[in-house]
Amino acid sequence: MQRQALLLGQLFNASVFEDISDVDYLQEKLDSVAQANTDLRTFDILVPQGDDFKVVASLEPGFIDRTTGDLNYVIAWHREEAVATLVSDIGRESGGDSERFWEIAMPLTNVQGEKEALLSIRMSLAVMDDLAKDTLTKSYIILSITVLIVILLLALNTRLFEHAILFRRLKEVDKMKDEFISIASHELRTPITTIKGFLSMSLEGDYGELSEGSKKGFKIMEASVNRLGHLVEDLLNVSRIEQNRLIVKKEPVDLKAVLDSLMLEFELRVKAKNLALKLSADKDLPQVWADEDKLKQVIINLLGNSIKYTKQGEIELIAKKTDEKLITITIKDSGIGMDASEREKLFEKFYRVQGEETRGIIGTGLGLWITKQLVELMGGTISVDSIKHVGSQFYFTIPIYNKETHKIEEKPQTEKRNQKTA
Ligand code: ADP
């Protein structure tokens, strides 16, 4: 702005130096220059008068004929060079705000290069200052937002950090819980087997004849120990599956033989409840690709449930080849059934339907979860259809043995049979 003001003064001088003594001409020129430069606040032409200077042309008509002994004018006049000063003023134009200007005083010369008058202009810095102020305000806003974002990020990070620690602790606790269940179940197994053994020997009269009252008591004890045994087996299975310790050894399995043996196994239990049990299997059932023990465990769990949750009617075990690669095994009953909301969480751990009809039926809520995991580990899927008070049918798929794609491996050396039997 300072350079622009100086240049303006020089250009003005160049355009008037031939008629520098013509005051009217100077006024006319000065007005037209001011019109083209909106940053110009004052524009005066002065001539020396004694030690002072008198205004002969001005943007403000009221200034004409005024005299001033401004020091800058005196310096500019005597040194014969332009003097530029930065001044700040409670401006006439800026509505009370302080306005900054470049004030230029420079002698005006005639054609011969002699100084004849003095030019004084004030070039406002308002546009620049407004721009700077605006930029500063925007910068403050951006800075505030940035600081806010940084604070938020820090807060979030601290939370994330806390969550990470919490998550790690939870994982540790979860691991400890799994280990505890695994150890406790193992440790419980031996005394349960011992108690069962002594109870059955006592009931068989190995320790002397029992009175009817004692027999009744021992039978109740036997039922309770059996329940405890099932719970421990279920917990052991859950912990094996969760810790990926369950070995599934797939091999070609004669499904028909498995189904026949299970029909025999369940005959007495079904009869005891006055139910009917039917097997409907395809004539030439192909071999399936499965772990025989696990496959039996799955069917035992589902048949066991059907018997548990059916008061009267029939239970049907169906085995059908549903496509080139799969056999679908269905366990259908005419039991208490379930509605949609009861079916929703059916395969979740510890879920049991709570209702009038299930009250008093003993269970852990682990059987179907274990069953689902086993089916999936053998490459199948399981689902259920059920209508309340009509019955349920659970069906799962199992791959058909294929010589080309299924490779027979060596038998694993260790893994005890763990079957849920009720
Ligand atoms: P539980 O040890 O309680 O039988 P499961 O995981 O085997 O545990 O079964 C979960 C719940 O699903 C049962 O408590 C029962 O309410 C319901 N259920 C399972 N099978 C049947 C069925 N065949 N008919 C009706 N309800 C069933």
Image: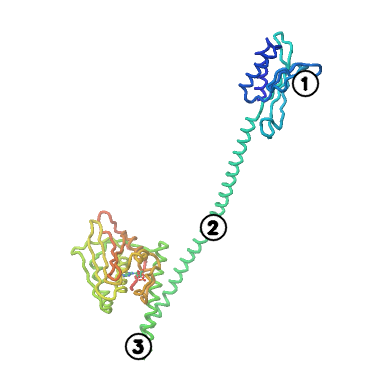
| Amino acid on which the number 3 mark rests in the picture | Gly
Query: Where is residue 170 shown, x and y percent of the image?
Result: 50, 61
What residue sits right under mark 2 in the picture? 165
What residue sits right under mark 1 in the picture? 67
Q: Is residue 293 left or right of residue 241?
A: left
Q: Quadrant of residue 96?
A: top right
Q: Is residue 267 above or below residue 287?
A: below
| Amino acid on which the number 1 mark rests in the picture | Thr
SS type, badge 2:
helix
Sequence order check: which comes first, mark 3 or mark 1? 1
Query: Where is residue 143 shown, x and y percent of the image?
Result: 60, 42
In contact (CB < 8 Å): disc 1 and disc 2: no
Sequence order check: which comes first, mark 3 or mark 2? 2
| Amino acid on which the number 2 mark rests in the picture | Ile
Sequence order check: which comes first, mark 1 or mark 2? 1
398 or 38, which is in the foreground?
38
In contact (CB < 8 Å): disc 3 and disc 1: no
| Outermost residue, front side | 62
Q: Is residue 123 left or right of residue 274?
A: right
- Residue 205, numbered circle: 3
Mark 2 close to ligand 1, CB under 8 Å? no
- Residue 170, numbered circle: none
